[in-house]
Image (spheres, coloured by chain):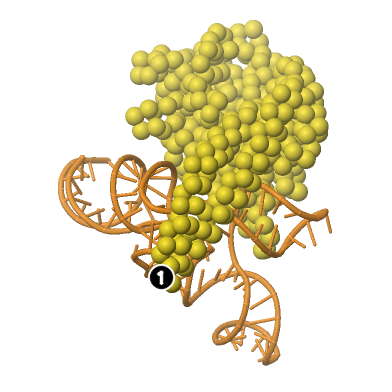
Amino acid sequence: MLQLATLRERTDFVLQRLAVKNIDAKPVVDRVLSIDEDRRKVQMELDQLLNQQNTIAKQVGELYKSGKKAEGDELKNKSTALKQTVAELSDRLTSLEEELNQELVKLPNMPSERVPKGKTPEDNEVVHQEGALPSLDASAKPHWEIAAQYDIIDFELGVKLTGAGFPVYKGKGAKLQRALINYFLDKAGEAGYREIQPPILVNKDSGYGTGQLPDKDAQMYHVQLDEFYLIPTAEVPVTNIFRDVIVKAEELPVKLCAYTPCFRREAGSYGKDVRGLNRLHQFDKVEIVQVQHPDKSYDTLDEMVEHVAGLLRALQLPFRILRLCGGDMSFSSALTYDFEVYSAAQKKWLEVSSVSNFETFQANRMKLRYRAGTDKPVLAHTLNGSALALPRIVAALLENNQTPEGVVLPDAIRAYTGFDRID
RNA sequence: GGAGAGGUGCCUGAGAGGCCGAAAGGAGCAGUUUGCUAAACUGUCGUACGUGUUAAAGCGUACCGAGGGUUCGAAUCCCUCCCUCUCCGCCA
């Protein structure tokens, strides 16, 4: 969430930035500022009274010790008289703080200066494109037909076991999954990311820390009996490693990567966009996460973008990079690059990665700070990106590399699969 | 799942109604000593909010797992919850 101090000191700036996300934040900001003013008044009053109580309590103790019972008793009454007011003020303070927080979490992150204005995905800016788009002949099949032909992904079987959106990978399909995961993890390792294997169920606090809760709980599967949530991305457990943590400045950047399955309810999405591997309830993803010094986080973002580009290049998939416009960015991001891969039979660009700088937005929620020397702790910047999400990569690989003799795999992963083609 | 023990600052660990934001040691940081390393000594060493300020210092308040309660006064007493550890059972 945004920092109160920023809201207070640079109100107009905040409003102007949020306008890029097409949000008129003025009503909320005004409410925040006015609640905050009340809050400070109440706290001042309350602190003063508490101070009186503390002073009296000390005096009572001393009086009793020196045997002056009567005087002590008299003072006691004085303190008792304050009690009701103290209780009232302190209730008031608590509710003001809650109110303040409620308003504050409504405000999305401010987009950085580089974010283009715009409302819809059409307004996203294509900043890079590479790789020739394959031209397949008319008999080219979409990936779900190829998957069925070679019996490597079974969507119907997934429906039987669980439901739609939970495919079963079989034989070379399953091996391909494993190969891609290992390949991505190895590449992340080479780039200096430390591998993490986190829990894939998390508690409420973690969901809140990265911003899925309280608002987007409909997107997560919820294990009600134990109050756990299935993670929608490894970002949740991995970033929450740093919840309530103060890292040393010299330890920055912290670079972590993790493979996890991801679970998304995707309530309300049906139709041909969800055909095959295009949109699933369970999928595999390798995520890269960094905690970085505020001065360096945008260089880091570029570095992460380059890492993802390198993966797609190695897989010989045509891709483009989009800088998301204000209207299409996520709630907590300050700047996001999406990667899309061209899936030649569907003739569609499929999103396979999203790389974002959250600046202090998540850090503020999580109280993730760094400390230089003996200075006061300062909020760090957090970044993350998919490197990569598997299903749409697999879709593009199957479609783009189909031949009459089978699907020919790119060199980069042959050492991992142990086979060159799916047939 | 059953029985017991316990949750205190960066760590170890004392405190068992007022003298406790909290002993002591370690780590860290700054300095002294030293040819260097090591050691020794001295000092410093939590966070948040409020106030103050150009900035700070300072001052106030809160925090000893969480939330309630008793009391003039709670880390300390009472209640509820959460978590961890040990033993037993079950088990990949």
Q: Is residue A332 visible?
A: no
Residue A164 in the image: above or below residue A34: above
Locate residue A410, reporting x and y percent. Answer: 60, 31
Residue at position x 41%, y 33% in the image? A228
Locate residue A132, reporting x and y percent. Answer: 74, 23
Which residue is labeled 1 in the image? A67
Quarter-of-image position of residue A28: top right
Q: Is residue A127 found left or right of A38 in the rendered image?
A: right
Residue A272 in the image: above or below residue A7: above
Q: What type is the residue that disc 1 sits on?
A: Gly
Locate residue A214, reporting x and y percent. Answer: 53, 29
Residue lying farthest front?
A: A70
**Chain A on-screen colour:** yellow
Residue at position x 51%, y 16% in the image? A267
For disc 1, the chain is A
Q: Is residue A221 visible?
A: yes
**Chain B on-screen colour:** orange
* Crowding at mark 1 (Cα within 10 Å: few <14, some 14-19, many 20+): few
Q: Secondary structure at mark 1?
A: loop
Nearer to me, B22 or A168: B22
